[in-house]
Amino acid sequence: MAKVKKEVKEKEKVKNKEIAVTVKDLHITYRGLKKTSIRASWKHIGDKVELFHALKGVNFEIEEGKILGIIGKNGSGKSTMLRAIAGIFSPDEGSIDLHGRSISLLSIGVGFNKKLTGRENIYLSGMLLGFSEEEIAKKEKEIIEFADIGDFIKKPVKTYSSGMYSKLAFAITAILETDIMLIDEVLSVGDVKFKEKSYNKMKELISDTTRTVIIVSHSLSTISELCDEVLWLNDGEIKMIGPADEVIPKYEDFMRG
């Protein structure tokens, strides 16, 4: 009887789990100019616009505390999805609801002012994430120690290698913890020692049952080990969503075919 009651409580707990992210009928389209002659009349410029539909009516929800992996071939809309959830891109149609939660995006090339030093970017990034200067100051030493880039912390970010950039970006996002973390391929960047350290830190962070994580990666082993569910995007549409051990084999078959 006690076992039955425990199972009922666990089912009720799952049933009452709050939704952290709701994506509803999301459309995002990029607009660019087709190649044309300089002599072409400006009156016909509208005819030269080329549209690329990056996301086409995407719908899904993520429960609080879940780890969702997003996979798909290049150009399938994975990074566009993350940037839309992060608020960098605005939907052309549809909506994204974070239900009042704080969010951070960890992606190479996003979020730093390259003219500022690493230390100055810690404060800039932290304040953009919604933290006060006092809160960031309390975490500054820990961020610098984790990033482990030496005196480069005092130098402009434009002098950084991609490895140093990723170390500092990861350290800021990992130490200044938000409710929702978005990670775009960053775990695959950096030296071997830092990859191991960041991977272990990632596992520590996502063990928190209230933190929601979305990971975009081409590393299917990383997705398989870290993620509860996998969303497979193909040409801007959801091809499949479900448990990692169901989605990944079908994706691999698709890519081999």
Image: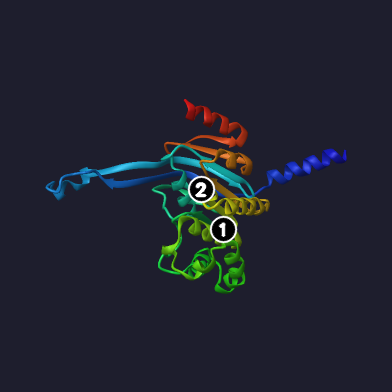
Residue 34 horizontal side relative to residue 23, left or right: left
Task: Check the picture and name the quadrant holding the N terminus.
Answer: top right
Is residue 222 visible in the rendered image? The answer is: yes
Whether residue 177 appears in this view of the structure is no
Task: Give left or right: position of 192 versus 17.
Answer: left
Of the pair 157 and 71, the residue shown nearer to us: 157
Q: Residues within 10 Å of mark 1 (few under 14, many from 20)?
A: few
In the image, 177 versus 20, the foreground residue is 177
The residue located at (39%, 48%) in the rendering is: 92
Instruction: Identify the disc placed on residue 185.
Output: 2
What element does badge 2 sit on?
A: loop
Disc nearer the start of the sequence (1/2): 1
Say if 128 sits above or below 62 in the image. below
Residue at 46%, 69% in the rendered image: 155
Q: Total label count?
A: 2
Where is residue 185 shown, x and y percent of the image? Answer: 51, 48
Instruction: Say what amino acid the circle numbered 1 marks.
Output: Gly
In the image, which is nearer the foreground, mark 1 or mark 2? 2
Q: Position of residue 188 (x, y in %)?
A: 53, 48
98 to 152, vertically: above or below: above
Is 68 situated left or right of 254 in this image? right
Residue that label 1 marks: 100
Q: CA distance from mark 1 to mark 2?
A: 26 Å
Colouring mode (rainbow / by chain / secondary structure / one colour)? rainbow
Q: Amino acid at mark 2?
A: Glu
Measuring from the top left, give residue 69's x and y in whole percent.
56, 43
